[in-house]
Amino acid sequence: LQTARDVCEDLEDIPDDGPDAEALSNNEKTAVCMPLGGRLDMTLSNIGLLEAYPEMRLVTAGQTVRLVGSGRYELPRQDGHYLSLIPWKQANVTIRGVKYPLDRHDVVSHEALTISNEWDDEAADLIVHEGMVLVLYVKK
């Protein structure tokens, strides 16, 4: 049985540590490799799959994307990466342990307020009070 890491092994910059390394190694989550980039229509379609399959992560060289709903999430620091949050339409979030924290802030998809944040701690604490948020680890 191949793990997601085996399937993705040809990619450069697959994380060796951080939130998705363990999932790639032991298949705790479903990982789709190389779903980002190339044709925009295919990229958007792949991101849309996250709504139907919340356990899925999209993994490509230097980037990991997942969709989270209401709840609390620990987002471990991944050195050399930015942490971006993109509301899936709109959301209300609190984020701590980052350079630009927010407290119960309404975010909408046409704002760039939650893009390219950086960790101030070993992990960021994300609370999604309402809505859904795409969580992206993006290589600097």
Image: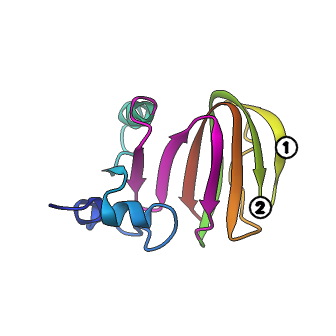
Q: Is residue 138 left or right of residue 20?
A: right
Residue that protrudes farthest toward the right in the picture: 103
Is residue 54 in the magenta section?
yes
Of 97 and 8, nearer the camera is 97
Q: Depth check: 51 or 74 in front?
A: 74
Q: Residue furthest left?
A: 1
Residue 110 position by quadrant: top right
124 relative to 89, above or below = below
Q: Is residue 68 magenta?
A: yes
**Residue displayed at 44% across by 30% down:** 48
Residue 103 image label: 1
Three-letter code, disc 1: Asp
> What percent of the width, then of the height, locates residue 102?
83, 46
**Segment colored magenta:** 51-78
Give the label on residue 97, or none.
2
Q: Quadrant of the C terminus?
A: bottom right
Mark 1 surroundings within 10 Å by alpha-carbon count, few (fewer than 14), some (14 through 19), many (20 or more)? few
**Percent position of residue 122, x then y:** 68, 71
Q: Residue at x 49, y 45 (%)?
A: 66
Q: Picture quarter containing residue 98?
A: bottom right
From the viewer's perspective, is 104 left or right of 139? right
